[in-house]
Structure formats: C-alpha cells, structure tokens
Amino acid sequence: MIARLGLASVLSMNSVASAPDGVLFDEAFLKKLEYLHIVSKKVFSGAARAERRSTKTGQGVEFADHRNYAVGDDLRYIDWSVYGRLDKLLLRLFEEEEDLWIYFLLDASASMSFGEPPKFDYARRVVAALAYVGLANLDRVSVAPFNDGLGARLDPTRGKGQVFKVLEFLRGARAGGATCTAAALQAFVHRSKRRGLAVLVSDLYDPAGYEEGLNYLRFHKFEPYVIHLLDPAEARPALRGDLELVDAETGALRAVTVTPRVLQRFARAHEAYLRRAEEFARTHAVPYFRASLDVPFEELVLRIFRAGGFVK
Amino acid sequence: MGGVFFAFLSVRTLLLVLGGAAAGLIVLYLLRLRRRRVAVPFLPLWAEATSDAQSSALLRRLRRLWSLLLALAFAALLATAAADPRPAAHGEAARTVVLLVDASASMQATDVPPAASRLGRAVERALAYVDGLRPADAAMVVRADGQVAPVTSFTPDKDLLREALRGLAATDTRADFRGALALAGDALAGLPRPTVAVFSDMAVRGEAALGLPDLAARGVATELFPVGSSGRNVGITAFSVRRYLANRTAFEVYGTVQNFHAAPLRVAVRLYLDGAQVSERLMDLGPRAAAPLVEADLTVGDVAHEGRLEARVALAAGGADDLPADDVAYAVVPPHRRVKALIVGRAGRENLFLEAALVGGEAVDYERAACESFDATRLARYDVAVFDGCFPPAIAAAGSGRFLLLDVGGATPVGTAGTAATPASATEAVPWRVGPPVAFPPLAPARRDHPLLRWVTLADVGVAEVRPLLPVPGRGDQVVVTAGGDKAAIVARSDGAVRAVGFGFDVRRSDLPLRIAFPMLVLNTIDWLTFSGDDAYRASLRAGTVFSIPLEGAAEGAPGVVLDGAASRAPARARVTFPSGATHEVPLHDGRAVFYGAERGFYTVSGGAAAPLLLAANLADPEESDILPAPAFPTPTPLSVPTVSAAAATTSSGSTTRTGLPFGDDWWRLLLVAALVLTLAEWLTYNRRLTV
C-alpha cells in the first residue's frame, strides 16, 4: 500500500493529523527526502549496501579467516581443501554482517529554540532526512533528544516504512531546559548496548562543555558525528543600548551596555567558540559539520554525504 | 559686550525654569534605570565579550554622571534660548534707526547676482538688519533718490518695515544723499541712540559724501552697507535734437556717449524715430572716455510732425552692461507750428511781393482783408497781422499781439481810404511816430545778429523814400535797419505780450522785393513775431528734477492776438501722462505745469488751449552712470554717542554681522545650535539604541 501511494502522499496524509508541527514535515520536505535518498544512492553507487560489515566473524558470506576446529563446530564450515593439503581441520570463518545502528542525539535544550527558523526545527529536519536515508539503507535508526538529561528516545527501528514513526517522534519533540551534554550522553551510552554511529545535532551551547560528552561516546566505541547548528544572527545580534541579558537556559542575568565595540567583541568571542568546537573535533577525529540556518538543510545533508563516512 | 539681558523672560523667571528643569532631570536620573530584558541563547559568550566593560563600575557611574550633566546642559541651553538673550550693550536703551536705502538710478545696476539689482541686494541686507533689531528698537525707512522721502514713520513693527523695504523701487534719478542724510539727522534729533544705516552702492562723488560728517557732528552713529562693485557701464549722458532753421523737415542729433568702464569698449548706437531705425554707428570708446554723438541731416516727413526719437547704445560684442537705465535716451523732434497770418491792405493794392514771400514759407497760411472793411475782432483768430498801408486804431494801445506794419509813415487808419497824408489822430494811434522822409537812403543793418536779418543782405538795396521811425523809449524798440546811417528804417518792438515790426518804407517803392533777401526778411519777421521759444528745439529734461512746463493758453499772457484785453480762462490743473502710462493731474502756476518727473521716457502734458505737449526726459547724469563705488567712502565716527558701527560689519558681500557673531544679536539661534551639537554628542557618546 505504501509503495503504491508513494512516500510523499502517505506522509502528507500523516502530517495533516499532526497539526502543531504539520509544516515541519510538509509535502515539499518529504519530496526532498526522496530526492536525498536518490542522490545518496548515486553518491554511494557500487558501494551501496544494505549492510554494514562488522568486525565480528560469523554468518556472513565473505571469507575472513580460519581457526582450528573445535568440538561442536558446524561441520559444514570445515575447509576440506586445507585439510587435504595440511591434514588439519580448520574451520572457515566468515565476516558477520550486521545492521548499522545510527543514533541521532538531538539537542532539545532551550537555546535550540532561537533562530529564524528555530535551530530546533532545522535540527529536526536534518535528523529526519538522515534517518530516512538510513532507514532506506536498512540501517537501524534511533533518535534520542536530550537537554540536561536524556529524554524519551525512539527505539531503534529499521526499514523504510518506519520513517513515519521517526517523523512522528520528531514532530512531538520539544525544546526546553538547560543543556548538560556530558550527563545526557553518559546516560545514552549506558542505555545503548549496541554501538554505532552517534550523530550529535546541537548548537553546542553547553555551559559545562560538550567535550566530555563526546569523549564518553568515543570511549565507549561509538562513532560520534557532530552537526553543529549555527544561527548567523547570533553572531551579529541586533542589540543596542542598556540591556539586561537573560540566559535562555539557566536564567542567569547580566547587565550590559551594548555598543558597537561590545558587539565586535561578542562577534570575536562567538567566532572563537566555533573555532574551538571545530578544533576539538579535528584533534579527536570526530567528523564535524557546521550547519548555518541560512543554508537549506538538504545542502547540509548532501555535504555530509559527500564528505563520506556517514554511510559506509 | 558688557553683559547680557533677556528680552523674552526675566532673569527670575529664567532661573525658576532652569531650577525646575534641573530638579526634574535629577529626579529622573535618581530613579533606577530599568534595563530592558533580552533573552539570549548563550550568556557566557556575552560575559566574555563584556568582561572589561563590566569590570569598572566607577567608570559606569561616571558615565551616568556625565549623561546627567549633558541633560542638564541641554535643558539650560533650551531655557536660555527661550529667554532670548541679547548683548547688554544693545539692551541698555532702545535704538532709533533710520534705514536709508539708496533708490537712485545706479541702484538699477545688475552686478550683484543672484539679486536682480543693487537695490534688491540692498533690500536684502536691510531686511537682515531689520531681523536683527530688538523688539524695543524703532526704525524708519527712508528712500534716497532724487526726491528723498520717508516711507514709514519710526516703528518697532518689523513686518511694516519689511513691507516698506520690499516695496522700494529704483528710480531714474540721482540720489540726494545730502538731503537724505539731513532728513535722517532731523528725524533722529532728540531720539535715543540715533543710528543711520545706509544701504547704498556708494556711487556718489564729491560733496554728497559730506553729509556724513554733518551727521556725525549731530551725534548720530552711521552704519554703511555697500552693495555692488562693478563699474562696467556705458551710457548716453546727453541727448538732444534740433530741426534745421533753414530746413525744418530735417533735424540734427547731438549727444554724448560715455564709457565708465576701465577698459575700452566698442558700442553700437542706433537711432529710432517713432520706432523705426534711422541710423546706426559704431563707436570706439576709450577707458572712462566720452565721445560726441552727432547725426546730421536726418529727415522727418512733415514739418508739423512731432517725432519721438530714441537713441539706444549697446555693446558691439553683444551682451549688456551693468546699468541699463542709461542705455536708452529720448528726445522729441518738435513740430513746426503753421502760422496763420492776416494781410490787411488797401483794396486794389495787393502786395504780391509780400504774398509770394509768405507762400515761400513752409508753414505760413495767410488770408487777406481790406483796410476799408477791416473787422478788428478777426485778429483773435490769427497768429500775426500784417498791415500794409493801414493800421487799426487801437494798435498802439494793444495789450498783446503780433503785428507787422509796412510803410508806417504812409499808412492810414483802417476804415478810411486815406492818402499819403497822415491825419494827426491817426499818427497818434500808430506805434511809432515817423520823421521827415529821406530820399534814396542807403539801408544798412543796425544789428547784424538780430533774428530778422538772419541770412539777409541789404547791400545796394535801393529805396525811393524812407520815412524813418522814431523808437519809443521804454517800449522795447530795437532799430534793426537804418537808412542813411542813423535813421530807423526797420524797428522791432518786444514789449511784454506785444511784438511788432515796423517798416519805414514802402517795399513796392524799392528793389528789395526783387532780391533774395526780401522773402528771408519777411519770413524772419514772421518767425520772430510768432516766436514763443525756439520751436525748432525742445530740450530733453533730466529725470529727477521738477519740471516746469509752459502751456499755451493755460494762463493769461499766453500767445495769441488779443486786442480787447480779455484773457482766456486758464485751467487750474494740467494732465500729465508719465512714461509708465500713469496719468496724474498737476497744478498750474503762471501757465506752467509743475511736477516732479522721476522716470525717463516720454511725458505728455495737456492743458490749456494748445495740443498736448510731448516731452522727453533722460537720466543724463554722468555721476549716476558712473556706477563704480567710490574707492574710499568716508565713514566718520559720531562725536558724542558711542557708535555701534564699530562692531558692525560693512563688508561688501557678507551678511550683516552687527556684533561679530554669525547670528548677530539673535543669540538664541546660537544656543539652539549648541543644544543640537550637545544632543549629537550625547548620541555619539552613549550610542542610544537605534534598532531595538
């Protein structure tokens, strides 16, 4: 049924039911998803596979190694040709093929609600697009929003038909609260037994720092990706005069007199903050993508595809 | 300056306003400034950016204090400006000012763009002066041209002064500076702080400037506001026309064209008769040099035609000089009036020689009458009466008239068919007694310069008999021609309204009619008898003077043969049409229309029995045409009153700066500018928000 109607038509019917965020995944968005899926196939042509080779040997079809026969081993995997030459019972080992587990760690803190459009909406679109491509490639996809802790997550799901589930989940997600990346990712690591890609979609506005959380991922064998969302207007705020600034997450106050000079210094501080994030990712071999809100999300997704490594 | 006084608010009120404003501002600043709250996504970045700025609380307090001081200064400036501060030197007493505006012809010069003329520029400066007057000051506008006149009385009403200034117009006259300054001095006598502000091009020479020292001696301060600087002008400074006496159908033009510029100029002078060009010539004029303009043998078709002649001078290279008022001059080609003569002779003895001579005249019409049936009442209709062999009984006692008496000794009273013998009663009636006859005497001119003998030669004239005339003492008799050396053969009498010429011989008994001299003598006699001024020449008038124009028939004693002594009734007023087209009635004094002509061009004066009289008036004033301002105009200091002119600027092009400040006495403008600058500084300093 779904295949006959096509993804866009089915999803558009579905989106009508979700009135509050109906525009988030509208028909145009869904058409873009299909476009991205097709493009991803072209990008990975020849290497596109539904599976991801794991480092484990097992029930795969591609030869990996030999080992000595042990009692109880399946006699079907004894390499009789080797036995003939070497007079040893060796068992043929094959690389075990397993699904790719992709975890989308979606920053749902209050700072993500800033921007025009809000960074959170942009982030949800990016996550939806990447999830769709992953589902289409038969990977297992999970979405885990977080702020100062890990919230309700979407259990890993697989198959293209599960995209509605993902979109529905994203549609219901809300931004709010403070950010504590370390605590949230620590909780994520402990709750996720299967390792995989951990795509962090965040503005990295964490007073305590995002580095510790990323290190948690790395230390627990996850492959972290960082998609750093950036609102250009945040670097050049249209503020003047005597103001009392309120931190949207912590509620902290600061009285400032905004002058052009202060704005220049703020821009420099903002730029330095971005550079630090990029430098951290580079030095720790974490793929890092900076996404500006003034760039369409599909361009970002394609950029990620072209950078390679996201889908192997 | 000597201090400040406030024209609008008292010092007490000003202090109250200042105190109230300061208190209000301080209260407002004591109230804690409520900052606007703005949510930001990540405050630590702002903390990093503002760490230095937030570190100095003392500096913040100082900035707030500085802001308060700026606000207080702003309020103080506004309040002080509202109080209208002025220098105390001007506020000690109200001033009384005469705004003397030169409206002479030179003020028509166009060398002060963008103003249309020097007068326009002078009015602009005078308006600026009026703007600077204090409310308590009083001023009067005086127009200085050929006829100095106050345009307003002393008034503090600036609108009235401005209206009067804007209504001024330059005339074609010379400025009577001396009279204007005297008027200003008289008007200011006894008034507080008297001042005369002169707005003029100062293109005056000689004693005109002497009025300033006189003014200074009377304690009147003087402020001079010169306008104009150019001397680039060429003009017609004299212009007249005269018919030839010998040929009244032709005329000759005389004039003077003068270059007042410091460089040589080539000009084209064109003459127009009744609008049609009759001549053109190019003239090269040296620097500040004059050249005569003479055009001979110009013709006008009809001797009785009254022509309007215009001379126009223009730069040969094109363009115009700076003063157009003297580029056109006007003159009238006077009409030659036809004379109506009555020849009274004996029946059957017509004097054909005499009639032939009269016919040869260009403008003489005559009729005949017989001595025997002569009616004296007819004489009133003729300009001149010729009695040939007879005379009217009352001719000796006539109060007015023009008579030519031929053969006085042989004449008989009219109404009698007399013979050569003269009755005693008749002899008593003739103007002259006659002496014993002289046979064949030689004739000789007694006065060669007498008009009767113009172009007349009497040499070898043969006369059979002359009965010499005996001139009457006290009656204005002049012997014109003698017979035999000392006998009067021809006598001319000019006695008040009576003119008479007597011949002591019968021309028919001489060879004089056969000579060319006879018609000349007859016509000269007719001309002399009917002469009421040189009708071949009508002088052009000078604009800016009082014209006194005699009108024929406008008063008793006017020309015309009146034997019964009854004078025509003179009108009380004459009507004058000015060059501008305006028509005014003017009074008559002794048969003369008296009026002031400030315009150049053609005037028409009508009144009395004669036809309207056409007159021309020109600027004809080299001093006005010389528009270059005097190089060193004396500016004496008044003797007793401290002058404000010491601080007054007399720059040639700048605005009025009477106190050395750009805004004059209007300090409130300066204060407003300062407040504006202060606001700008505050904005720059505190960078008030623009977009949020």
Image: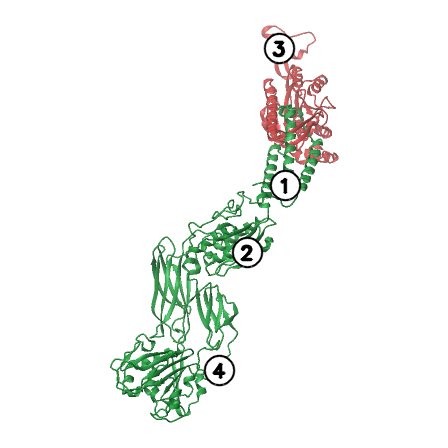
User: Residue extending furthest front?
Assistant: B473
Q: Tell me where residue A59 sits by quadrant.
A: top right
Image: B237 above or below B514: above
Label 3: which residue? A66
| Residue B363 image offset from top left, x and y in percent | 38, 79
Labelled pair 3, 1 in contact (Cβ < 8 Å): no
Question: Residue B187: which disc?
Answer: 2
For label 4, count other residues whose C-alpha is less than 10 Å away and answer few (under 14), some (14-19) or many (20+): few
User: Color of chain B here?
Assistant: green
Report helix, strand or loop for mark 2. Answer: helix
**What's the amino acid at mark 3?**
His
> Image quarter for residue B71?
top right
Neighbourhood count class around disc 3 (C-alpha, 10 Å): few under 14, some 14–19, many 20 upward: some
**Compared with residue B287, is residue B680 higher up or lower down, i.e. above or below?**
above
Residue A2, x across and y down, in percent:
71, 32
Labelled disc at residue B80: 1
Along the viewing direction, whichever of B416 and B647 lies nearer the viewer = B416
